[in-house]
Image (cartoon, rainbow, N blue to C red):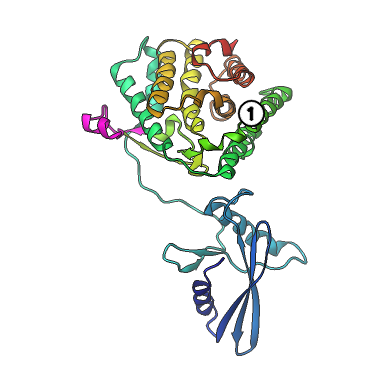
Amino acid sequence: MINELAIKAHILKKFSNALGVDISQLGSGVQGAGFLIEVRTPEGIRSYVIKSLLAEGLGHDYPSDRAAVFLLDLDEYNTLPNHVKAVDVLSEMEDGSIKSIGGGREYYLLMEKAQGTNYFDDLKLLAEKKRLDALDKDKIRSMTSYLARIHSVKKESAALYRRKLRDTVGHGECLMGVFDTYPDGVIENSEMSNIIKKSVDWIIKLKPKHNRLSQIHGDFHPGNIWFTSAVRSPADRESGGTNFILLDRSRGPWGEPADDVTAMTINYIFFSIINFGDVSGAYKEGLQLFYDEYIRTSGDQEVTAVAAPFFAFRGAVVANPVFYPEVTSQQRMRIFKFVLNVLDDDSFHVERVNNYLG
């Protein structure tokens, strides 16, 4: 349904000579519904149609999805010969009012400035340590307790869970989109295809597990985690508080918890390969501690059994020479070997991490 009162008020404001507005439903289909808008003016009736989209499925789950569809419609309806013309894109606000968002050539996000030090700095310093120190462990426990807390918020929606699986492989910002940014010759086409095909097999395998749908961050990688203090207070620990601020929540608020967990843990593997050729020292200890603490605090014993396609996506990210030009071909091949071997296993086994590199 649409907010008829608010739309009528907007139309009367938009058309200064309008004498009245009548709205009636034209019909509905699998994607949404259409409504006839008849504006009575001194010159006669001017007729328009408003289109709405259903709010779940077909990639229309979030308001931003539906806005993207309509903004594209506004851009393209008017450029194709013989196509019905688009007039505007309307947005219903929190207070029920209607405003125009159409006609923009570009869009920008205004947000607060973050303060702190991102976790990439910590990962670089781990190369100089044989073991984690107390501060390293505290930061890992801070991150895992935070993830356990947000992942405890659940939602019943098979469509949203399956969307997360689908997006992990097919979205322009995820596995296939990241591979599309690779320069030619970095990875054999057959190897790229193999990773994609095995990831598709995994998402089909995971589709029934929609009971795992949880609140997530969506891009929980080191650059998006800025620590604001060295240690947490006892009160913070008791309340589940954190000593970091997050940036760039991405690709929707609901998904598979393994998405957040692998977004971080691929980095212990990646940085260790870059520095040592395998997973060892403080990096290996950090990887193990992260999983141990996350599983302990969340109670999620299944997270390693669903991690494979998310590791494939994150592996493609860290092996990308556009993002990390300093990575050598040999190091990159070790990352791809890790991805393929994890995809071939029934579950990610933390203790076997170096076996996946061979």
Q: The C terminus lies in which quarter of the figure? A: top right
Task: Provide residue 72's location: percent of width, then percent of height.
Answer: 63, 56
Task: Provide residue 227's location: percent of width, then percent of height.
Answer: 33, 32
- The residue to which callout 1 is attached is 202
Instruction: Please tell me which residue lies in front, 281 or 290.
Output: 290
Whether residue 18 is visible to the viewer of this picture, yes or no, is no
Instruction: Please tell me which residue lies in front, 301 or 26.
Output: 301
Q: Secondary structure at mark 1?
A: helix
Is 67 left, or right, of 260 in this rendering? right
Magenta segment includes 228: yes
Q: Amino acid at mark 1?
A: Trp
Instruction: Please tell me which residue lies in front, 96 or 303.
Output: 303
Outermost residue toward the bottom in this view? 42
| Point 54% across, 44% down: residue | 157
| Point 59% across, 28% down: residue | 309
| Point 35% across, 15% down: residue | 132
Decide: few, some or many residues near mark 1? Use Cα within 10 Å; few <14, some 14-19, many ≥20: many
65 to 91, vertically: above or below: above
76 to 159, vertically: above or below: below
308 to 155, vertically: above or below: above
Task: Provide residue 130's location: percent of width, then percent of height.
Answer: 37, 9
Number of marks in the rendered image: 1
- Magenta region, residue range: 226-243
| Point 42% across, 40% down: residue | 153
Task: Provide residue 98's location: percent of width, then percent of height.
Answer: 49, 68
